[in-house]
Amino acid sequence: MSYPNIDFLYLNEEDMIASGVLDASRCIETMRDTMYLFGIHDYLLGGPKANEHGLQMNFPQKSDIEGFPLDDGPDRRFMAMPAYLGGRFHIAGQKYYGSNSHNSSLGLPRSILTVTLSDVDTGAPKAIMSANLLSAMRTGAMPAMAATYLANKDSEVLSLIGPGVINKCALMCYMEVLPKIKKIKLRGSSVHSKTALAMKEFIEETYPQIEEVEICSSLEEACRDADVVSEAMSVTKENMEEFKLEWFKKGTTVFSMGSFLYRKYEDFLNTTMVVDNYGMYEKYLSNFKARGPVDEFGKKREWVIMGIHFVHLVETGVIPREQVVNLSDIVMGKAPGRKDKDEIVMCSIGGMALEDLSWGYDCYQKALSKGVGQSLNLWHQPYMK
């Protein structure tokens, strides 16, 4: 029996840029398509309920084995995120990355990501691509797409909490859908934060229509008077400030993509609660409980993800499940978006491999049409048959 030759396309970061990975408006519409397919269940994620974020490998905080890698900083992990997405994409694949906060001392990003696209039937690779920009753009495009349904159309003040790569990409996307933004507030680790100063410079050079860029000295200052709050922090729990609902004015829309420390969960009863995938946060909470109430050093553990706060309210009987809205239902027209100008909307965007596949697929198709990338051979004939 003869086996067919298998080639696949390799796309490095320059190839991805040439293939439109930074095209904000196009990415937003791809995310809209993705959430529609999620809503009609034309997808698969990992796990027995096909709703898990991915499989994460964490390092221990201590070990008796000499030289064993330790969790000696935030985000020390490896993650594999498999998925299938149907519709016009009909593609399988996964995002894979390693993460280590100490990478910055080496001049590297905290996480280094790749995405693989595979033939749904044979499993053969179709593309392997650099995915740092891909992942950042799809992450930033999701809240911007959600903002088309959830934010007040006349929003003028945007607050970026965590002025790193994710919120930079989110800013590029917000500016596509919120044309009346004229003031941007930034909250970094301090008023002297290098990332905040770099973001301020980027805004001033890229968006001359912005009248004011303010670097805030506290989380409260960043939240007050904002029409849209975009949270994308990557900090240890010890360095987190706790949010307070009283900081948000009537009509604020809050998007959380990272860490949202909040302890008075009942406060959310006075808000509209939206999630990208309710089942994913159910699994997060289940995993959290399975790990026990304290860490290896006896310190109390608590979750810091907005969507888990909502699931906790449901599971403790404080609210019915229907009170937490899936974003896909809004995209499909099965649920309303913003209902009135004064409601406070809290939207948790945890991210799914579906988004990496869809945006990766669209960039792959553009690369094929432009002749971008390098064709590599997996085999001409498998050695063992």
Image (tube, helix red, strand yellow):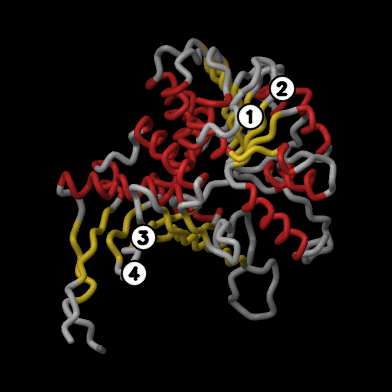
Question: Could you tell me if residue 233 is visible in this image?
Answer: no
Does the residue at mark 2 contact the one at mark 3 (Cβ under 8 Å)? Answer: no
Q: CA distance from mark 4 to mark 2?
A: 48 Å
Question: Quick check: 347 left or right of 110?
Answer: right
Camera sees residue 120: yes
Q: Secondary structure at mark 3?
A: strand
Upstream in sequence: badge 1 or badge 4: 4
Q: Secondary structure at mark 4?
A: loop
Precedes in sequence: disc 3 or disc 1: 3
Spatial CA span between label 1 and label 4: 39 Å
Q: Which residue is mark 4?
A: 123
Amino acid, disc 1: Val
Q: Nearer the viewer, residue 79 or 155?
A: 155
Give the alpha-carbon distance from disc 2 to disc 3, as whole Å: 40 Å
- The label on residue 254 is 1
Q: Amino acid at mark 2?
A: Phe
Is tag 2's residue or tag 1's residue first in the polypeptide sequence?
Answer: 2
Disc 2 crowd rating (10 Å Cα; few below 14, some 14-19, many 20+) is: many
Say which residue label 2 marks: 248
Q: Is residue 361 left or right of residue 238?
A: left
Q: Which residue is mark 3?
A: 116
Position of residue 122 relative to residue 30, above or below, is below
Instruction: Give how far apart the Cα atoms at labels 2 and 1 are.
Output: 9 Å
* Proximity of marks 2 and 1: CB atoms separated by less than 8 Å: yes
